[in-house]
Image: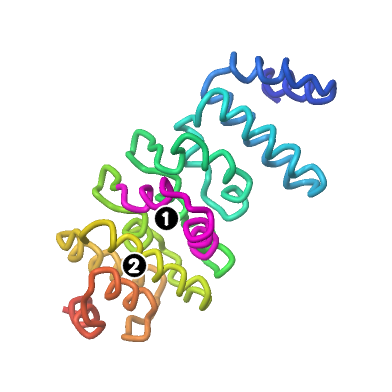
């Protein structure tokens, strides 16, 4: 185990919050990301400790700011849940890394688990937008990365999990699309890229391309095109 983590554990055992914060402030950004990862793991191991480690991580991020190297690490529902209080601070939902990607880009494009359980937490995010009055989160939904993709486009373009979304997640994603549409125009130039990408994704997984494929519905919804047109374009 790296020394900076050993020091953190020692200070945790002593419950020396002041020294822990100073140690965090004195550590490098990469070390900070590892330290926050350790806190997340501890909160996951024992649910009774979740709130303590979440509050600790939030206070550290509030004191030093959100490190750009942490952004790409928040890719699952569990990590999002843990870091949500910190992401609500200081416009962190729209803070970007060197790829010009924010947390939503990584959440939506995560390909690690090709199952329903591994899909993005669209419903959770919609709830945050609707009931948390989080304007920064809505702004983050409209940001474009270095490839000119919004988080929803990143999902449509790079997420290889074409397992149908659960109904509540599907309706939430459609609601997020509507939220984005109200804030900015769709970049139609990206449409042809998505047609090729979906074709490649389906072929790599031997997935049958038909008009019932949910990803076709979502592309049609996002780009405001008839489902038949999207289907025909894929099969050209």
Magenta-colored span: 120-143
Q: Is residue 58 above or below residue 16?
A: below
In the figure, residue 40 lies in which quadrant?
A: top right
Residue extending furthest toward the right: 14
Residue at position x 31%, y 86% from top? 211
Image quadrant for the C terminus? Answer: bottom left
Earlier sequence position, callout 1 versus callout 2: 1
Whole-percent x and y of residue 146?
A: 26, 42
In the figure, residue 91 lies in which quadrant?
A: top left
Q: How many labels does the image show?
A: 2
Q: Is residue 129 magenta?
A: yes
Residue at position x 51%, y 27% from top? 65
Q: Which colour assignment does the render follow?
A: rainbow
- Could you tell whether 207 is left or right of 168 in the image? left
Identify the secondary structure beneath mark 2: helix
Residue at position x 75%, y 44% from top? 50
Whole-percent x and y of residue 39?
A: 69, 36
Mark carried by residue 178: 2
Dot 1 crowding, Cα within 10 Å, few <14, some 14–19, many 20+: many
Residue at position x 34%, y 56% from top? 154
Q: Does the magenta stretch mainly form a helix, a strand or a loop?
A: helix
Report the mark closest to the observer, 1 or 2: 2
Circle 1 is placed at which residue position?
109
Q: Looking at the image, do the residues carrying marks 1 and 2 touch, with CB atoms under 8 Å apart?
A: no
For this rendering, which residue is in front, 62 or 80?
A: 62
């Amino acid at each position: 185990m790296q020394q900076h983590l050993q020091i953190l554990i020692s200070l945790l055992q002593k419950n020396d919050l002041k020294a822990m914060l100073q140690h965090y402030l004195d550590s490098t950004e990469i070390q900070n990301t590892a330290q926050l990862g350790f806190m997340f793991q501890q909160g996951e191991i024992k649910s009774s400790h979740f709130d303590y480690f979440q509050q600790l991580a939030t206070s550290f991020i509030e004191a030093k700011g959100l490190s750009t190297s942490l952004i790409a690490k928040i890719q699952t529902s569990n990590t999002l849940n843990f870091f949500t209080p910190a992401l609500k601070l200081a416009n962190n939902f729209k803070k970007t890394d060197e790829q010009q990607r924010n947390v939503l880009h990584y959440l939506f494009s995560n390909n690690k688990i090709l199952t329903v359980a591994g899909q993005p937490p669209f419903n959770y995010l919609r709830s945050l937008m609707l009931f948390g009055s989080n304007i920064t989160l809505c702004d983050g939904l409209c940001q474009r990365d270095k490839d000119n993709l919004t988080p929803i486009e990143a999902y449509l373009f790079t997420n290889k999990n074409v397992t149908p979304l659960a109904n509540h997640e599907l309706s939430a994603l459609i609601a997020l699309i509507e939220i984005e549409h109200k804030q900015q125009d769709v970049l139609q130039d990206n449409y042809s890229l998505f047609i090729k990408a979906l074709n490649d994704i389906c072929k790599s997984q031997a997935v049958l391309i038909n008009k019932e494929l949910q990803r076709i519905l979502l592309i049609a919804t996002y780009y405001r095109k008839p489902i038949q047109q999207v289907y025909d374009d894929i099969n050209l």
